[in-house]
Image: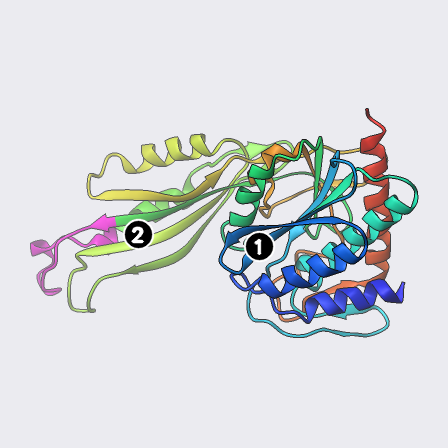
Amino acid sequence: MDDLFSLIRTLVDVPSVTGNEGALAGLLEKHLAVRGYRVTLQEVAPGRPNVFATTVKPPAVVFCTHLDTVPPYYSSSEDDRFIYGRGACDAKGILATMMEAAERLRQKGTDDVGLLFVVGEELDSIGAKHANQLAPGSRYVVVGEPTENRLASGHKGTFKVKLRAQGKAAHSAYPDLGDSAIDRLLDALASIRRADWGRSEVLGEATVNVGTISGGVAANVIAPSAEASVFVRVVGRAADVASRLDGLLSADPKLGYEIVAQNDAVFCETLPGFETAPVAFGTDIPSLTAFGKPLLIGPGSIQVAHSADEKIEKREVLRAVELYCRVAEELLARR
């Protein structure tokens, strides 16, 4: 399987930080066309195409993962056990295993499995949103993210907001003449952190993170304005989170919020005989509704994704090829 490991390193060595996916898409277009695929480059933004590859038949199952990585880029290396580099597990190693699995299936006469590689997953899922317009008629989409080769039973949704508080500036020696927006914001954030945001038997408890805080003009001035970004990992409906947030903030007319992104929790298809577990991170699945029922599985650990030690185990890569083939065969047998 040296060719597979070499392919992973080749993909890692093409920088594709979000917004700069064009070179990798071009490489994949050539690689897949040589192997007889019908390749469509779907322009999402200038120089940022999705790659959609099919065989002679419309796909009933589509393998999907993303082209982009988080910054900073760094090149590949390997030892006897691991392949290292930006994107090694998130998600270029996965991309390579999906292509290898698709080739094995074709060699066995299975020619209704497609490949979809999208831009922008690490930022806003813009590629998946555009891909959804392709509507290929597939019945299942197998999304690749680092799940340690376990079929994910689901993943948490997102509710990302920007809170804003208004106050009145004054000299800090006379706080009674002002109205601190920072104090108001901190009180609201304390209430948000204490609140119950829900629990799921599959996904566990919702979590909340205060990601950024800013405001004020100087240490000796009562702050006239302040804002914070908050991210709730949703285990049910995003609308329920919004309603709960309204209840916490509605009593104060000087507090408001803007929803930046939201989607409900995702519950995935699973198959008998596979190890399963939920994951807490988000994926492109909410934006791929036209591709059929979702499954989520891939080699690698999310705990090293986005890190300076990103890597993927070679043994896990080989196992993933087998699992992707098995998943596709079992799904296709459901006809």
138 relative to 199 in the view: left or right: right
Q: Residue 128, which numbered label?
A: none
Q: Hey, which quadrant is residue 77 in on the image?
A: bottom right
Assign the N terminus to one quadrant of the image. Answer: bottom right
Image coordinates for residue 214, horizontal then vertical, percent = 30, 60
What colour scheme governs how the chains and residues are painted in the rendered image of this protein?
Answer: rainbow
Label 2 is placed on what type of residue?
A: Leu
Q: Which residue is drawn at 78% across and 40% down?
A: 113
| Magenta highlight range | 165-184
Assign the C terminus to one quadrant of the image. Answer: top right
Image coordinates for residue 279, horizontal then vertical, percent = 65, 45
In what element is the residue under mark 2?
helix
Question: Going from the N terminus, do you reach mark 1 or mark 2 first?
Answer: 1
Tell me: residue 16, above or below residue 112. Answer: below
Q: Residue at x 88, y 67 (%)?
A: 2
Mark 1 vs mark 2: give the one in front: 1
> Is residue 171 highlighted in magenta?
yes
Tell me: residue 26, above or below residue 204. Answer: below
What residue is pinned by disc 2? 186
In what element is the residue under mark 1?
strand
Label 1 is placed on what type of residue?
A: Pro
Image coordinates for residue 159, horizontal then vertical, percent = 45, 42
218 relative to 64 in the view: left or right: left
Q: Which residue is drawn at 82% across and 65% down?
A: 5
Tell me if mark 1 has few (under 14), some (14-19) or many (20+) residues whose alpha carbon lies within 10 angstroms of its own: many
Q: Hey, which quadrant is residue 311 in on the image?
A: bottom right
